[in-house]
Image (tube, rainbow, N blue to C red):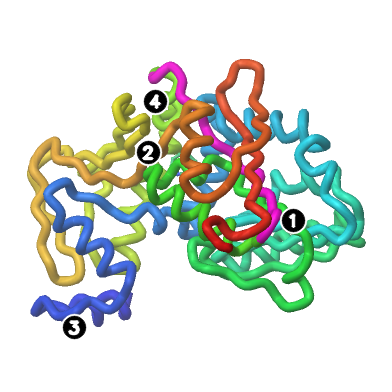
Amino acid sequence: MRRAQTLAKAHLDLGEVEDEFASSVIEGLSNAQKSLPCRYFYDARGSALFEDITRLPEYYPTRTETQILMDYADDMVGSVGDGGLLVEFGSGSSLKTEILLDHLGSSVAYVPIDVSETALADAKARLMRRYPSLDVRPIVADFSHALTFPADLAAREKTGFFPGSTIGNLAPQEAASLLTVFGRALGRSSRLIIGVDLKKDPRRLIDAYNDQAGITAAFNLNLLRRINRELGANFDEQGFRHRAIYDPAKGRIEMHLVSRHDQQVSVCGRTFHFSAGESIHTENSYKYALEQFREVARASGWRPARVWTDTREQFSVHELIWPKAGRGCA
Ligand code: TRP
């Protein structure tokens, strides 16, 4: 709180806001269509609410992807050779990873990458109990930044893992850029196993992001609570409601927070006006047809290979292969 007040005071006269969280919030709220940066959803409460989302009856992606991994793990990682490396981007609790680890030999090392040091430590402790001979080598990092491996791991054959359709939270062009970052990090002849949610009946999509129990609403509204706490803002959580819509042209679910009435909110010494019904756009979740996602992969420099889905084709897991030599290089 003290930090927040200092910030608010220091920047009252429109000075540069140095805090990255503060500056991205102010920037987003200054746009004609107000928005907030989705990467700040995951404070401790946000992470706990997200865990609850993954268990909701309406939220089919986690359950469906887990089943696909269980059904095809052997196909997915059976060919990973001795001394291979499994590299997970944004590993969190590493729960789905166990399904793959069950099908990997004991000489494989696992490199979980996450911004949360505590999530990495918890996951490592659990995995070391479950897989005593597994070499777990966590890296604390934002996976969207370029990554270099410790020298002793650099030359090993790498398989990337990016489940949860997190790729869908980026627009297709940004998704392609991120996939290129992954490819460069993993290097020649590497593979990527990536989960991608599929287009389907909009009703089912909307329900998945607007559950009966109101957990997704609480998750979305928690962003306002975090801004109040960390930036000393005065959002009234009761003054906004959660809305999920599907835009069929863009092929994406949009999450918004809609102002219930005319109101003003102050954030870091600036005042923002909300009219009744005006929304803050907080997140996108893009949905793909199988071939559409393969096209994004191609644009990023990966070669799409096998695809696994559930029988109802609700969710997909893709295998991508990074070429042996750099494209366009002699
Ligand atoms: N990437 C997943 C999805 O888009 C999980 C997720 C990210 C999510 N943010 C969310 C789920 C917000 C519900 C609400 O489905």
> What residue does disc 4 label?
206
Q: Amino acid at mark 1?
A: Leu
Q: Nearer the viewer, mark 1 or mark 4?
A: 1
Rounded to the nearest angstrom, the CA distance separating label 2 from label 3 is 33 Å
Question: For the point 27% across and 79% down, which residue is it?
Answer: 18
In this rendering, the label closer to the viewer, 2 or 1: 1
Q: Is residue 201 magenta?
A: yes
Instruction: Give the Cα distance between marks 3 and 4.
Output: 42 Å
| Dot 3 or dot 1, earlier in sequence | 3
Looking at the rendered structure, the kind of residue marked 4 is Ile
- Look at the numbered disc 3 and give the secondary structure of its residue: helix
First in residue order: circle 2 vs circle 3 = 3
Q: Specify whether residue 302 is in view.
A: yes
Tell me the magenta residue range.
188-202
Distance in Å between CA atoms under marks 1 and 4: 34 Å
SS class of the residue under badge 2? helix
The numbered dot on residue 10 is: 3
| Helix, strand or loop for disc 1 | strand
Residue ID for mark 1: 86
Instruction: Say what amino acid the circle numbered 3 marks.
Output: Ala
Disc 2 to disc 4, C-alpha distance: 12 Å
Q: Nearer the viewer, residue 224 or 296?
A: 296
Q: Are marks 2 and 4 in contact (CB under 8 Å)?
A: no
